[in-house]
Amino acid sequence: MPTDRPESEPRPRMRSTRMSWRIALAIAIGALSVPRFSAAADASDFPARPIRVIVGFAAGGSADLTARAVGQKLTELLGQTVVVDNRAGASGIIGTELVARATPDGYTLLEATMTTHGIGPNLYKKLPYDPVTSFAPIALMVRIPLVLFAHASVPGATLGQLVAELKANPGKYRYSSAGNGSPPHLAAELFKLKAGVDLLHVPYKGTGAAVPDLVAGQVHFMIDGPPPFLGHVKSGRLRALAAANPRRLEQLPQVPTFGEQGFDGIEAGLWYGMLAPKDTPRTVVNRLNGAINQALRDPGVVARFSAASIEVVGGTAEEFGRYIATEIQRWGEVVRAAKIQIE
């Protein structure tokens, strides 16, 4: 059909269609080339800035010591500063909640403990986070086995003789702890349940406050980590009677375990591991896990921990996740059997 438009003149509608297609293609290609600033996309460059480790307890204690020893080595291995931030209060709940609500990019981590992820979930029914699903496990770092220490005046040179004395005098003897719901409290209650003895609990505000009264004989027993007690054992004012551990301690090789003395199932230790907020990219978790395990193998770190009776553990993220679940279940049984309540 004849037309009044020259053949060389482009058709307006076709030009529009072609231009739209080209523009759409350009936008699509551009979109693919534009970096997405998500945690997952940035994981390959992790870490690109300093990392903060939240410790839910005051400076100077074993939790703080562990975080700083590992953090110092991580600074060397990762090429970024690892800062320890002490957020003490409410048995670690304040610091734990802070990390549970943090951006899941690996730059805010939590040093989890036996208190925050073993005992606490069984004592506090309305936590502002879920101790399991709110976090991504990275690695279990270290463990401090607990030991039963007795004042020198208490009868019984062995654990068996001591238990016989306790059964013959129910309610006569007192044990101290670092406070209601603390690991030493729960460990002593576990001993009471397994040995079938009756002891009176005297809670203190921390281990440091409890040790002097034990040395003075105001209380008779305490189950806690070794460092504050070793000097008093050496002087003869205290006796170390049993290690709540599968094997004997390096610094107390002469002290048999509870199991060796016929009391199976009495194992307790302060432990410290690293967690990230849930949804932290797996590549970030793997990077941190590898660096932590490498730090734990460092001879200087090992020597520093050994001097403080701290056992290096390490392992995979999955192993740590299973360990937390086991600890929550195990200490829940003790809390219920001992009818422990924290207001």
Image (cartoon, grey):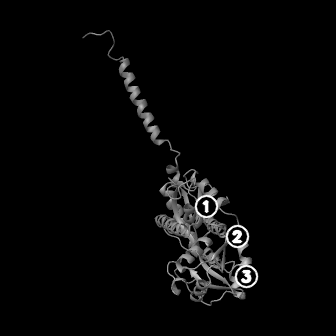
Mark 2 or mark 1, whichever is nearer to me: 2
Q: Position of residue 309 (x, y in %)?
A: 62, 78
> What secondary structure is found at the residue carrying circle 2?
loop
Kindly identify which numbered label has been placed on residue 19: none
| Quadrant of the image containing the N terminus | top left
Q: Tell me the residue that label 1 is attached to.
A: 79
Q: Position of residue 252 (x, y in %)?
A: 61, 85
Which mark lies nearer to you, 3 or 1?
3
Q: Amino acid at mark 3?
A: Gly
Residue 116 locus on image (x, y percent): 58, 62
- Mark 2 lies on residue: 204
| Residue receiving disc 3 | 217
Q: Earlier in the sequence, mark 3 or mark 1?
A: 1
Which type of secondary structure does the marked residue at label 1 adopt?
A: loop
**Amino acid type shown at disc 2:** Tyr
Q: CA distance from mark 2 to mark 1?
A: 41 Å
Q: Is residue 298 visible?
A: no
User: Label 3 vs label 1: CA separation?
Assistant: 50 Å
- Secondary structure beneath label 3: loop
Q: Position of residue 129 (x, y in %)?
A: 55, 54
| Along the viewing direction, whichever of 198 and 222 lies nearer the viewer | 198
Q: Tell me which label, 2 or 1, sits earlier in the chain.
A: 1
Given residues 287 and 84, the one toward you in this image is: 84
Mark 3 residue crowding within 10 angstroms, few (<14) / some (14–19) / many (20+)? some
The three-letter code of the residue at mark 1 reads Gly
Above or below, 187 against 9 in this view is below
